[in-house]
Amino acid sequence: MTISISSAFDSGNIQIVSQNGSGEFDLAIRKDEQSEFYQWFHFRLTGARDATCTLRIINCSGSAYPGGWVNYKARMSTDRKIWTQAETEYHAGVLTIRVTPQTDSVYFAYFAPYSMDRHHDMVARIAAAPGVRQQVLGKSLDGQDIDMLSFGNQSNADAHKIWLIARQHPGECMAEWWMEGALERLADLSDPVIKRLCEKAIIYVVPNMNPDGSRRGHLRTNAAGVNLNREWAAPSLDRSPEVLCVLNKMIETGCDFNLDVHGDEDLPHNFIAGFEGIPSLTKKQIDLLNQYKASLERLSPDFQTRVGYALAQAGMANLSMSTNALAERFKCLAMTLEMPFKDATENPDPVHGWSPERAKKLGHACLDALYSIIDSLR
């Protein structure tokens, strides 16, 4: 049987540079459309049962975050359900994956993928739950729906307005695994925390801000090569309709709390980035930010506050980024949650690394942390 590699499927990304006729391949990651960003890969190896294979991704040194390859392990799966860490080495700009498959087909990816089919299944399943509303806020550049799910008493004008958004950067698919965990819990009104949250708040959830990049196998951009998390100052229909339709809905509803869920290529930790450099920063915003982070750290051993991004200097925040833009516009608590592509240092798992299951559980813990501060938001 011929040993081959393919990536012509949802979120697939790899190019074959050379093959020696057996199981040795030199590969390259394709850049995002109209962009210099690349780091996400997702491909299938077939016909290699019991064959020793060496897969070299040779253009890693020019990727978006070269430091992200150090101490990183690729994910692999035979059934696209259970993903484990592959034998992986990084040296001199080349990521080498070595494997002897026990099956005829095995998938490799930068992280366990979250497909658009799974997205649509999840939206349909959650939207069918009692009390849940589903709305299409707009269309992406490729014409895909920007789905929003909402929870709580929609007629309560005094309710806190809570926004959860994810996957502005499509390759950071742990963000939508987080969303699946959060949405499944939000749809369970037998959960006393969720029941009380829905009495106090209306919760608006956009589980995938960038469906085009997700389907195309991009790391960071939409169909036009635009980084959506640099569009919040002035989104437009021709560059970033995904941000425009969500921001317009936020302006319509108001926003007391926003959590934007991401993944970080380099840091092997779960952490929160805030808005410390915005021009109109208030003590109340900082106090709420610190309360939320402290609560989440108590609730989840997977979350920590020791390591994170450097804080922006006073008045120097980038207001094109969602967390800064929303904290400044709405005077609200806005945050960016970052999860690792690498294993989490605080609670390592040598078999699975940071995984979809753990991302989902962190979604649960984030809702508990929200409940702990809900009465302080105004």
Image (cartoon, rainbow, N blue to C red):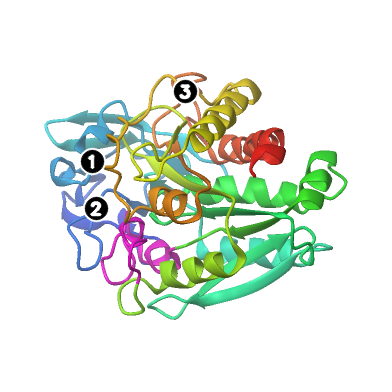
Instruction: Name the element at disc 2.
Output: loop
Q: Which residue is mark 2?
A: 38
Instruction: Name the element at disc 1.
Output: loop
The Cα atoms of the two marked residues, 3 and 2, are separated by: 29 Å
Residue 178 x %, y % = 57, 45
As for residue 193 lying within the magenta part, the answer is no
Q: Earlier in the sequence, mark 3 or mark 2?
A: 2
Residue 136 x %, y % = 59, 75
The Cα atoms of the two marked residues, 3 and 1, are separated by: 22 Å
Q: Is 377 in front, or is 4?
A: 377
Q: Residues within 10 Å of mark 3 (few under 14, many from 20)?
A: some
**Residue that appears at 53% across and 67% down:** 251
The image quadrant of residue 325 is bottom left
Q: Which residue is mark 1?
A: 65
Q: What amino acid is found at the position of numbered circle 3 in the picture?
A: Thr
Q: What amino acid is found at the position of numbered circle 1 in the picture?
A: Tyr
Q: Which residue is mark 3?
A: 305
**Residue that appears at 30% across and 73% down:** 239
Looking at the rendering, the stretch of residues picked out in magenta corresponds to 210-235
